[in-house]
Image (cartoon, rainbow, N blue to C red):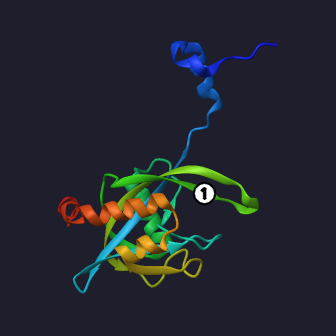
Amino acid sequence: MSSIDFSSVAARPILRDLKSLFRRPARLQIAALCYRVRKGKIEVLLVTSRSSRRWILPKGWPIMKRRAHKTAEIEAYEEAGIIGKVAKTAFGSFPSYKGHNGGLKIRTDVAVYPIRVERQLDSFPELGQRELSWLSIDDAIEAADEPGLCQLLSQFKSELAEFDKLTPA
């Protein structure tokens, strides 16, 4: 029985296509990077995941027939009661893993849409299911345990002044 040598796949279009069938694409989640100014300082919102209680951004699976930035807006409202102005383009993305009960983890890519917070409601769909914390960007970087999220928050910190000019008022 012979085996297929995938080392020269690039030279063989049929084999390259066959190899791609065996690779599962990353799943996409949409996240909201909620931020506000308090006492002249920028704060970002982190929430805990429901199962592992890790500090993350509000996020969820794409909603069919909704643009990604609208999904981010919905997730921010459902998970944290956030109302604000969402950027129509993603600030960035990072790789992550969606944990499930029983230890199964699914690789995801997370597209992140900033939301300049206008207000936070006292009542929202997931009230009591998660902890919420407004943190300085430096404290959020320290609290988040996902390297990709930490890197994205660092980038947000360094580009905030320029980015804030582009976000709708």
Q: Amino acid at mark 1?
A: Lys
**In front of the other: 80 or 65:** 80
**In front of the other: 56 or 154:** 154
Q: Neighbour class for label 1 at 10 Å: few (<14), some, many (≥20)?
A: few
In the depicted structure, whether residue 55 falls above or below residue 4 = below
Lateral position of residue 115 relative to residue 98, left or right: left
| Res 120 quadrant in image | bottom left
x, y (%) of residue 60?
52, 59
In the depicted structure, whether residue 7 falls above or below residue 131 = above
x, y (%) of residue 2?
77, 13
For the point 20% across and 67% down, which residue is it?
Answer: 169
In the depicted structure, whether residue 120 falls above or below residue 156 = below
The N terminus lies in which quarter of the figure?
top right
For the point 33% across and 66% down, which residue is it?
Answer: 115
**Residue lying at the far right of the rendered structure:** 1
Q: Give the total of numbered labels.
A: 1
Lateral position of residue 59 relative to residue 101, left or right: left
Q: Please, what secondary structure does the residue beneath circle 1 have?
A: strand
**In front of the other: 136 or 47:** 136
- The residue singled out by tag 1 in the image is 98
x, y (%) of residue 92?
36, 53
For the point 31% across and 51% down, which residue is it?
Answer: 89
**Residue lying at the far front of the rendered structure:** 7
For the point 40% across and 57% down, which residue is it?
Answer: 112
